[in-house]
Amino acid sequence: MKLESLKELYIEELRDIYSAEKQITKALPKMAKAASSPDLQAAFKEHLEQTKVHVERLEQIFEQLGTSPKGKTCKAMEGLVEEGSELMEEDAEPEVLDAGLIAAAQRVEHYEIAAYGTVRTYAELLKEKKAVGLLQETLDEEGETDKKLTELATSLVNLEAAAR
């Protein structure tokens, strides 16, 4: 595909994020099941519900743009999800696996933060005011999730893994 305008790039980037979010909705239940910490399980389940809302917001933006969210596969998220899947197949102590799951989840969050920040900026430049609000809301939530994962790691999970 030839990208001839910022709007075309914006739509392609939105499709990439949409694909990423759809992949995350499939990965999070597996991560919750693999986690041994009840707090970490709850965090993954909470993020799954939040991710479903992120997908809905993106669908609203695509509707406003009069285009489909389909057509692109986020290869970066495929790789991140695959790394998480490989980790879950390791013969790891439960506390150590939990620490690794947090690390995998934070790599996903950081990718999403970068992606949402980019498309929010494009939306601002394209004067897509409603999309800016929706994207900023999601960006804020992704940042909060990252902070929660850091708190969980530093206050509980990594300490338990270090005690092994």
Image (cartoon, grey):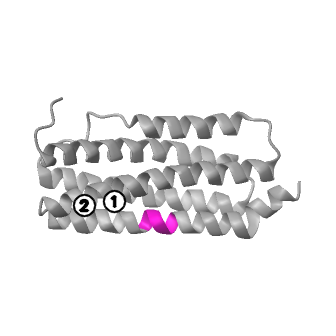
Residue picked out by circle 2:
121
Question: In this orientation, which residue lies closer to the viewer: 130 or 111?
Answer: 111
Give the class, few, some or many, for how many residues have Cα within 10 Å of label 2's Cα (few <14, many ≥20).
some
Q: Residue at x 65, y 34 (%)?
A: 86
Please check the rendered image and state whether residue 67 is part of the magenta-colored stretch, yes or no. no
Q: What residue type is labelled 1?
A: Gly
Q: Which residue is drawn at 13% across and 51% down?
A: 65
Q: Which residue is drawn at 75% across and 60% down?
A: 158
Instruction: Find residue 117 and report its image quarter.
Output: bottom left
The span shown in magenta is 141-145
Mark 1: secondary structure: helix
Q: Where is residue 25 in the image (x, y as percent from the top left)?
A: 47, 47
- How far separated are the C-alphas under marks 1 and 2? 6 Å
Instruction: Find residue 116 and report its image quarter.
Output: bottom left
* Secondary structure, magenta segment, majority class: helix
Residue 35 seen anywhere in this rendered image of the structure: no
Against 52, is 146 above or below? below
From the viewer's perspective, tell me whether residue 77 is left or right of residue 6. right
Q: Do the residues labelled 1 and 2 touch (CB within 8 Å)?
A: yes
Give the class, few, some or many, for how many residues have Cα within 10 Å of label 1's Cα (few <14, many ≥20).
some
The residue furthest top is 1
Q: What residue type is labelled 2?
A: Thr
Q: Where is residue 43 in the image (x, y as percent from the top left)?
A: 59, 62
Mark 2: secondary structure: helix
Please check the rendered image and state whether residue 144 is part of the magenta-colored stretch, yes or no. yes
Against 35, is 89 above or below? above
Residue 61 seen anywhere in this rendered image of the structure: yes
Residue picked out by circle 1:
117
